Amino acid sequence: MKQKLLTVLGNIKLYSSYYFAIVSILGAMWGAFAMYDNWRDSNKILQNNVNQIMNTQKVQSKTDSIILVQQTQMRTQLNEIQSTSSSLQSSYVKYISNDRTLTKQDFLKYMEGLSFDTKKNELIDQTGSIVFPLSIPSLLPNYDEGMSTVSK
């Protein structure tokens, strides 16, 4: 009976070692597959983030192009306004200088209203505080033409 008991205990020991070996191998395989799955998910998240960044950069480059087109248009318009203002100012100076009833004080007060404050305009250009109305880019004049010339 002692012999039988030792044989049964030996068999239990043998089978338990097989069982724990199989459980250990399965646990290691499960850990490896879990690690691979986590790595694959991280790569998918990274790819999604890269795609989002690329799409954002495309939108930003379009916005930058629109800003450049608007800045060019605004400079052109500002130059036209300044040239018109200077020509009007010289015309008014010629006309008013011939008026004998106008006093020097009235003339200076009138001329002060005509001139632009160029230092203020330069500060606006330096600080970049000019805000462009970009809420609806498709409503901008020459939107498609500006995009094709700036992006090339």
Image (cartoon, rainbow, N blue to C red):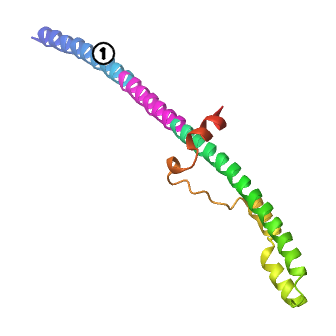
Is 2 left or right of 14, judged from the image as shown? left
Mark 1: give few (<14), some (14-19) or many (20+) Cα within 10 Å.
Answer: few
Q: Position of residue 129 (x, y in %)?
A: 68, 62
Is 99 left or right of 36, judged from the image as shown? right
Q: Position of residue 48 (x, y in %)?
A: 45, 33
Between 132 and 128, the one lying in front of the other is 132
SS category of the residue bearing label 1: helix
- Quadrant of res 23: top left
Q: Which residues are magenta?
A: 33-54
Magenta-span inclusion, residue 122 = no
Which residue was labeled with disc 1?
21
Residue 110 vertical placement versus 77 (above, below):
below
Tell how many labels. 1
The kind of residue on which mark 1 rests is Ala
Magenta-span inclusion, residue 50 = yes
Q: Residue furthest left?
A: 1
Residue at image location 84% in from the left, 88% down from the top: 106
User: Magenta stretch: dominant SS?
Assistant: helix
